[in-house]
Amino acid sequence: MMFHYFTAPTQDAWGYDAVTLSNTGFLAVAAVITALIAAALLLRPKQERTKGITAKQLVCSAAAMALGTVASMIKFADLPMGGSITLFSMLFVSLIGYWYGPKIGITTALAYGLLQFILQPIFYTLPQVIVDYPLAFGALGLSGLFYRQKNGLLLGYIVAVLGRYFFAFLSGMIFFGSYAADYNMSVPIYSLLYNGMYLIPEAVLTVAVLSLAPVKSALARVRRIAVESQSRRTAV
């Protein structure tokens, strides 16, 4: 199978058989990330594309992805089967959708999910990778659905986290449901509780911070800077 060209056998932290990316696999995932970022640029409105690549959009999106990646490594809690409470990493990725809308937000978040996969490329099956990384993290781009609304960042962030929660729950149901028996729980309850243990605390903390007036003001200024050239071109 072609799948074997991109993977190599390994073991997870508990000694179970798993797979990791081969050198070819790393290159393939890196190519997909590059293609997704390029696609995000092409998804801009036609009138913007005809005037060339908006460097500010590229820089701001890359900066948000980089900050999200760094923040994901700062963990308040790290669960044994995956998942952690991080320093607002989901917020940084959600900002891209809030700045530029759902198309760019979701596409860039998909790339971010693959970047997270590269950082810890130990997995079991290809479907599990798809659900746990590009789909779960890609859902953070749903924040873009509210980018034109009042309080759009707060609403968008909540919907983005719920989207990630859904795919994390789905992954727990399909791929890790066997662990529910260890806790005498049904599979849906186990997946719901386990994934909620790291997603909900981070979300609650982030919402509390976003509700602070100085933070609102600062993020509003950042958004104006991020979309300034876009707004001027639209006006022209």
Image (spheres, helix red, strand yellow):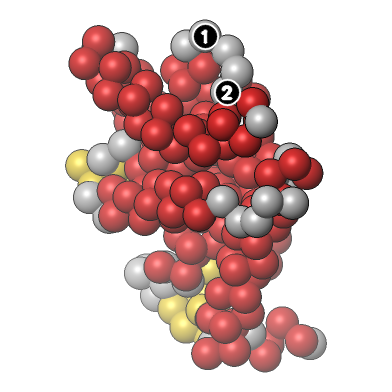
Q: Name the residue under label 1.
A: 150
Q: In this view, does 31 lie above or below 215?
A: below
Circle 2 crowding by C-alpha within 10 Å: few under 14, some 14–19, many from 20: many
Circle 1 crowding by C-alpha within 10 Å: few under 14, some 14–19, many from 20: few
Q: How many labels does the image show?
A: 2
Residue 162: numbered disc? none
Q: Quadrant of the N terminus?
A: bottom right
Where, by quadrant of the figure, is residue 32 drawn? bottom right
Where, by quadrant of the figure, is residue 183 drawn? top left
Is residue 178 among the parts visible in the rendering?
no
Q: Percent position (x, y) of residue 186?
A: 58, 32
Residue type at the position of mark 2 = Tyr
Where, by quadrant of the figure, is residue 140 drawn? top right
Relative side of 117 to 85, left or right: right
Image point (74%, 51%), residue name? 50
Separation (CA) of disc 1 from disc 2: 8 Å
Q: Mark 2 points at which residue?
A: 147
Q: Quadrant of the C terminus?
A: top right
Judged from the image, the secondary structure of the residue bearing numbered disc 1 is loop
